[in-house]
Amino acid sequence: MQHLLPEGWTPPVGYSNGIAVPAGRMVFIAGQVGWNARQEFASDRITPQFAQALDNVLAVLAVAGGQAHHICRITAYCCNKPAYLAARGELGAVWRERMGRHYPAMSMVFVSDLLDHPAQIELEATAVLPV
């Protein structure tokens, strides 16, 4: 996996501008919210929901034989921008605990609401596994 940083650009913090991956088995993970395997929310707070949503992404990926470092792209949808900004330090700690220093290409989109109430954040991912 090659992280793409155009010459002269300031390196991004917490994500990559782009990732190049040699051919492999692509895995597309649908949006995962912060509920458990029984589709129950343990919290309405963004940090525990983010942790559970990321765990859910990694659980789906594991079924395909993948690991965190195979993730090339994550799109996050969040319906509470002030809560997200206030929790960035906590969210970063959750990220490092599960993903280490692996930072895929990422997009953050703020939306008015998510389908599954009381979801605060939803993560979808694309991974490439070696063949």
Image: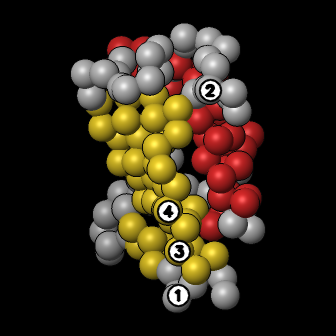
Q: In the depicted view, which residue is nearer to us: 88 or 78?
A: 78
* Mark 1 → mark 4, Cα distance in angstroms: 16 Å
As drawn, the residue found furthest toward the front would be: 38
Q: Is residue 85 visible?
A: no
Q: Is residue 63 visible?
A: yes
- Residue 124 percent across, percent down from the top left: 46, 48
Residue 39: give its label: 2
Q: Residue at x 66, y 58 (%)?
A: 61
* Mark 1 → mark 3, Cα distance in angstroms: 11 Å
* Mark 2 → mark 1, Cα distance in angstroms: 35 Å
Pick whichever of labels 2 and 1 is earlier in the sequence: 1
* Mark 3 → mark 4, Cα distance in angstroms: 7 Å
Dots 2, 1 in contact, CB < 8 A: no
Q: In the depicted view, which residue is nearer to us: 7 or 131?
A: 131
Dots 3, 4 in contact, CB < 8 A: yes
Under mark 1, the amino acid is Pro
Q: Quadrant of the C terminus?
A: bottom right
- Give the residue number, with chain letter if any, for mark 3: 26
Under mark 3, the amino acid is Met
Q: Residue at x 40, y 48 (%)?
A: 75
* Local SS, label 2: loop
- Residue 100 percent across, percent down from the top left: 70, 50
- Give the residue number, with chain letter if any, for mark 4: 28
Q: How many marks?
A: 4
* Mark 3 → mark 2, Cα distance in angstroms: 26 Å
- Residue 52 percent across, percent down from the top left: 65, 31
- Residue 1 percent across, percent down from the top left: 56, 77
- Give the residue number, with chain letter if any, for mark 1: 22
Along the horizontal axis of the image, is 55 left or right of 119? right
